[in-house]
Amino acid sequence: MKSIFSTTEWPKRANTRFALAGFIESRMPAIKRIIETITGEKLSIQNQNNFQDYMLTLS
């Protein structure tokens, strides 16, 4: 499984991580559609670390 986009390398401060993860979570379907349109690849959204991290992977 190849990662296209991941939040796991984001800032380690919890409040910053949660704010960024919330922002991404609410926009992940749109980000997924944009990347799929550009690349022509089918992607899937993976939740990691108790839903604190999100990753788009080639499916």
Image (cartoon, rainbow, N blue to C red):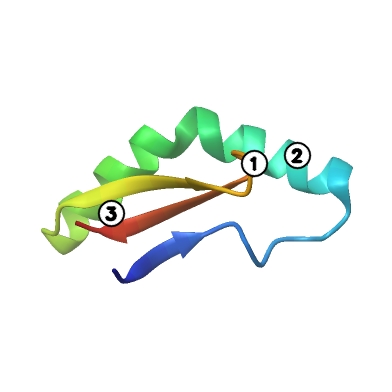
Disc 3 element: helix
Q: Residue at x 62, y 49 (%)?
A: 49
Kind of residue indicated by mark 2: Phe
Kind of residue indicated by mark 3: Ile
Q: Is residue 55 left or right of residue 39?
A: right
Instruction: Tell whether label 1 touches label 2 (CB within 8 Å).
Output: yes
Q: Is residue 5 left or right of residue 38?
A: right
Q: Residue at x 86, y 47 (%)?
A: 14
Disc 2 element: helix
* Camera-nearest label, 3 or 2: 2
Disc 2: CA contacts within 10 A as few (<14), some (14-19) or many (>=20): some
Q: Which residue is mark 3?
A: 35
In the rendered view, tell whether residue 27 sits above or below residue 16. Answer: above
- Quarter of the image where one finds residue 13: bottom right
Kind of residue indicated by mark 1: Ala
Disc 1 element: helix
In the rendered view, tell whether residue 3 sits above or below residue 29. Answer: below
Residue 31: x and y in percent read 38, 44
Residue 12: x and y in percent read 83, 60
Q: Which residue is mark 1?
A: 21
Residue 11: x and y in percent read 79, 60
- Quarter of the image where one finds residue 29: top left
Direction left: furthest residue? 40
Instruction: Quarter of the image for the N terminus: give it.
Output: bottom left
Q: Which residue is mark 2?
A: 18
Q: Residue at x 38, y 67 (%)?
A: 3
* Camera-nearest label, 1 or 3: 1
Disc 3: CA contacts within 10 A as few (<14), some (14-19) or many (>=20): some
